[in-house]
Amino acid sequence: MNPHRHLQRLHLQSPQASTLAHFYAKTFGMTCHEALGVWFCRHEGREVLVSEGHAGKLHYALFAIQNPAEWDAFKTQTSHLQPASLKAYPELPASALGFCDPDQNCMVFVLASELAQATKTPEQQAPSAAPPAAETQHFALRTQQIEAMKQFYTEGLGFTLSDVVKDDSGQLKACFVRGNDMHHTVALFGAPVTCFDHQSFETPSWEDLKNWADHMGHLRTEIVWGVGRHGPGNDVFFMVRDPDGNLAEISSEIEICSDKRPVGQWRHEERTLNLWGKAIMRS
């Protein structure tokens, strides 16, 4: 059956942490404040943290596991993995578990009820002109060792493989894994560089996606890709770039997968990434 792990937040590094944080706050309608060197950008359903570091580097991704039984099963499943030290992240609950993938991206997991207690913050004023609803839904990484990364996320962490993308020789070029019934929670792209690629916020409908696009136009934030429709996931989307060059996506209508859905097979070509036209190819 599909697991029940939901992406709650991304913590990004940046050589211009304040600038990056204020970009996400303004562009994606979040409050923003700094505490102990970490910028917290939050609105209902979406959350981005930023601290000083290298551009294009993910500090950690945080997933909530919904119930105690699945939490216990996850701890058993990952007992053979080396836990990551989380001492550098005081905003995390003490019970959180972290594991580094082969590219040293830290994936953190916590029981949902404990995360709710740990993230209580003083009441803050919402943005005066908040755009439509959108929730943190997935992110993507570029990697030079995609087979090892696929194995880590599926066999190590127990994510479900949704789709693979292969070239004409059969070499794996990309894969999409899910932590719940939405088509992908993590996308992995084979590339000549290793870095963070994008994060995506899922909005409920076509109408909301159009309103988000109007919101970007009002802010004069350029849409650099889209509107389009992905092959894997079948979601409609557009993307903008943040000040560090990372992509940030608004998506809607992503495929909902049954437990018995077979793994999808896609050809490595532009049309796979955008059924409607041009695509940003990672390799």
Image (spheres, rainbow, N blue to C red):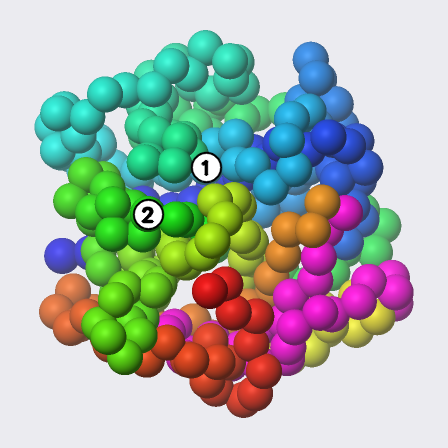
Q: With respect to residue 148, does 110 lie above or below?
A: above
Q: With respect to residue 245, does 237 lie above or below?
A: below
Going by the numbered disc 1, the residue's amino acid type is: Ala
Q: Position of residue 234 (x, y in %)?
A: 41, 78
Q: Which residue is mark 1?
A: 61
Relative to the observer, which residue lies in front, 66 or 5?
5
Residue range highlighted in magenta? 218-243
| Residue 78 shows in this picture | yes
- Residue drawn at the location 45% of the way across and 37% of the way down: 61
Secondary element type, mark 2:
loop
Quadrant for residue 200, please give it. bottom right
Query: Closer to the N terminus: mark 1 or mark 2?
Result: 1
Q: Which residue is mark 2?
A: 145
| Residue 179 shows in this picture | no
In this picture, residue 241 sits left or right of residue 1? right
Going by the numbered disc 2, the residue's amino acid type is: Gln
